[in-house]
């Protein structure tokens, strides 16, 4: 923090010093320009009188008259020729060509008056310039440094404190305190925006890490059931007394391996739709065509079930990722077909800015206290592992992630008959 204050103090001091130097340079240039362009009347009169006095003299008399003029005026006056080394050649382009013209030169605080035959009178500043003692200069410099440091502290300390809070929050997170947050105190400025962005990032990371932890725990639990059944099936197969019993055990093991394979595939798909890992490739999707294809593809799940499509003929195309949308609808339709008693109804209609799809079944429905949890990985209304109802437990979780990626909406409602209505709204 001290280093930051010193840096700010040095920057302020250099800025103030540079500003003073620039202002001094500009004022001097402006004063020199104005003085030489429109000199004061007394200066013009004096220059004219001196020029008239010297114009009547010969070249040999000029040095003597210069000394006499210096004695009378008690000033430092020298006679110089334009070819003298001491004469500033830059003045030749600035001073006039006629005798009597003059130019004030601020750099050495002097005035050059043109005489005849390229001679000039050089009027130099006399007397000691006002000098300041080294002690006074040191006091002024110290005072400026002190004032600058106090000003920098007044400006920087609130900012430093807020940055320090950010640093401490980052340290706490690095130690594993995922719920640590920075307090976005102070004005709504860049540091406040940084604190809010930091908190948003920390909350996102905490949610993702917690999600991964819960998912790992759930996956570990889900893997135990089929692996235990496989181990038990192998033991039974070894003890089988007939070839027919052995074939039955092998079939059961194969089914369990298929279930494991399905679980792995669903996990990979769920992971691909993880927050920030997949972009939506928008393209026109014919909802009617997708739903008709899904009904044909899933008919084998419940051949006795009646699936009714009620899709508006004037339904516009939906802008969505075709594969993701199809997968979401497949999971929702398959879920409805698993729990339906006799029929499933699929309705699709459009509003001014949304496409609404309802997939309704006449099954037992979903309790209200489970309508949020049902979209979490491995959460089931039916905790069984039966092939007809239990499933892998990731279908609706994948649907929720697809919905979120499309900035769409899903909720579970009741149907008039008591079943579940999987209600989704997609932006057009």
Image: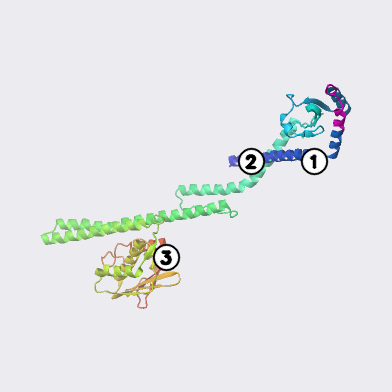
Query: Would you name the residue on which mark 2 appears?
Result: 9
Q: Outermost residue, left direction? A: 242
**In the figure, is residue 61 to the left or right of 231?**
right
- Vertical placement of residue 21 versus 171, above or below: above
> What residue did someone put label 1 on?
38
The picture places residue 254, in percent across and down from the top left corner, at 20, 59
Q: Nearer the viewer, residue 342 or 100?
A: 100
**Residue 31, image x, y percentages:** 76, 39
Discs 2, 3 touching: Cβ within 8 Å: no
What's the magenta region?
49-61
Q: Quadrant of residue 47?
A: top right
Vertical side of 31 occupied by 108: above or below: above
Q: Which mark is residue 350?
A: none
Inter-mark Cα distance, 2 to 1: 43 Å
Task: Name the residue beneath numbered marker 3.
Answer: 408
SS category of the residue bearing label 1: loop
Residue 258: image quadrant is bottom left
Query: How far is the residue under mark 2 from the one under mark 3?
Result: 53 Å
Judged left or right of residue 128, residue 337 is: left
Residue located at (29% from left, 64% from top):
391
């Amino acid at each position: 923090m001290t280093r930051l204050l010193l840096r700010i103090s040095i920057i302020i001091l250099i800025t103030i010093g540079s500003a003073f130097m620039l202002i001094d340079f500009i004022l001097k240039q402006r004063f020199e320009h104005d003085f030489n362009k429109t000199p004061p009347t007394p200066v013009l009169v004096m220059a004219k009188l001196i020029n008239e006095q010297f114009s009547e003299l010969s070249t040999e008399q000029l040095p003597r008259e210069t000394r006499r003029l210096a004695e009378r005026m008690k000033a430092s006056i020298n006679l110089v020729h334009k070819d003298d080394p001491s004469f500033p050649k830059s003045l030749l382009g600035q001073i006039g060509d006629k005798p009597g013209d003059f130019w004030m030169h601020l750099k050495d605080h002097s005035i050059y008056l043109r005489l005849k035959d390229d001679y000039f009178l050089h009027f130099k500043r006399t007397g000691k310039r006002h000098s300041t003692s080294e002690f006074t200069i040191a006091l002024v410099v110290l005072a400026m440094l002190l004032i600058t440091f106090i000003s920098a502290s007044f400006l920087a300390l609130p900012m430093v404190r807020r940055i320090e809070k950010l640093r401490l929050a980052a340290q706490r997170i690095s130690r594993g305190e995922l719920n640590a947050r920075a307090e976005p105190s102070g004005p709504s400025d860049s540091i406040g925006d940084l604190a809010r962005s930091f908190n948003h990032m920390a909350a996102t990371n905490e949610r993702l890490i917690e999600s991964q932890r819960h998912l790992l725990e759930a996956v570990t639990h889900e893997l135990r059931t089929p692996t235990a059944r496989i181990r038990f099936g192998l033991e039974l197969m070894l003890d089988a007394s007939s070839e027919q019993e052995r074939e039955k055990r092998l079939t059961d093991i194969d089914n369990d391996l298929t279930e494991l394979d399905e679980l792995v595939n669903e996990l990979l798909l769920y992971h691909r739709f993880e927050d920030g890992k997949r972009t939506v490739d928008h393209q026109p999707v014919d909802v009617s065509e997708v739903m008709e294809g899904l009904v044909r593809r899933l008919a084998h799940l419940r051949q006795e079930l009646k699936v009714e499509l009620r899709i508006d003929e004037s339904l516009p195309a939906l802008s969505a990722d075709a594969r993701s949308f199809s997968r979401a609808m497949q999971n929702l339709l398959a879920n409805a077909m698993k729990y339906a008693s006799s029929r499933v109804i699929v309705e699709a209609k459009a509003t001014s800015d949304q496409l609404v799809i309802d997939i309704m079944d006449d099954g037992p429905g979903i309790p209200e206290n489970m309508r949020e949890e049902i979209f979490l990985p491995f959460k089931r209304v039916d905790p069984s592992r039966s092939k007809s109802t239990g499933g892998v437990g990731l279908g609706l979780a994948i649907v929720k992630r697809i919905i979120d990626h499309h900035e769409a909406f899903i909720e579970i409602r009741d149907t008039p008959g008591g079943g579940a209505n999987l209600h989704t709204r997609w932006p057009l």
